Image (tube, rainbow, N blue to C red):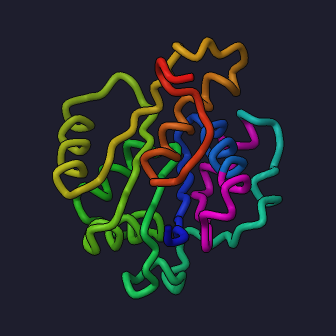
Amino acid sequence: MDKKKIIVAITGASGSIYAKLLLDNLMTLADQIETVAVVMSDNAKEVWRFELGNEDYDRYPYKFYPKMDFNAPFASGSAKFDTMIIIPCSMGTLGRIAHGISNDLISRAADVILKERRKLIAVVRDTPFSLIHINNLKIVTEAGGIICPASPSFYSLPKTIEEVAQTVVSRVIDLAGLRQDSYRWNEQ
């Protein structure tokens, strides 16, 4: 199996726990990954501090890129990043992606991933959806993106908030094509 080149984009939507757990999980799957590049919006850092009570996002062993760094390798399809995970994905970010507005590195990278027919996974967390949101979800899906709502499952009988959030992150990891040990419905 070829090793993955993954972009993790973290927006200012509520749900920093999902981003944290994804980064934690990617470290344990390092043998399947060539590189992980991370870009966070300013709001994402603020929400992380508020929701998780720390600034541990800067302690991960990944290269972090400023949100306006259009010189980042994944701002071009020639860098051959194969997967982009936006976790959590705000509806504002999704709307900009849906309409081709590449005004920061997150929306530019998503534009590149879609135009190159690579894998874009948007973990949307907002609820309820307005018709505008639904239409943007449809547009991104029709362009080849995968919408993975941050809707946890409960059949694994999670006991903590981390275990609940992990049900979403495990699904994202599966969608990214990485092998992992996780709960599988009716499998031993």
Q: Nearer the viewer, residue 91 or 57?
A: 57
Residue 75 magenta-highlighted: no
Q: Is residue 117 above or below residue 141?
A: below
**Which residue shows up at 60% across the image and 66% down it?**
33
Residue at the farthest front position: 188
**Which residue shows up at 46% across the image and 74% down it?**
81
Image coords of residue 58 (percent x, y): 78, 60
**Which residue shows up at 23% across the image and 56% down it?**
144
108 sits left or right of 157 in the view: left
Q: Which residues are magenta?
A: 26-50
Q: Quadrant of the C terminus?
A: top right
Image coords of residue 31 (percent x, y): 67, 64
Q: Is residue 55 above or below residue 184?
A: below
10 sits left or right of 28 in the view: left
**Which residue shows up at 40% across the image and 51% down it?**
121
Image coords of residue 80 (percent x, y): 43, 80
Q: Nearer the viewer, residue 8 or 31?
A: 31
Q: Nearer the viewer, residue 131 or 121?
A: 121
Q: Main secondary structure of the magenta part?
A: helix
Q: Which of the 4 image quarters holds residue 76?
A: bottom left
Number of marks drawn: 0
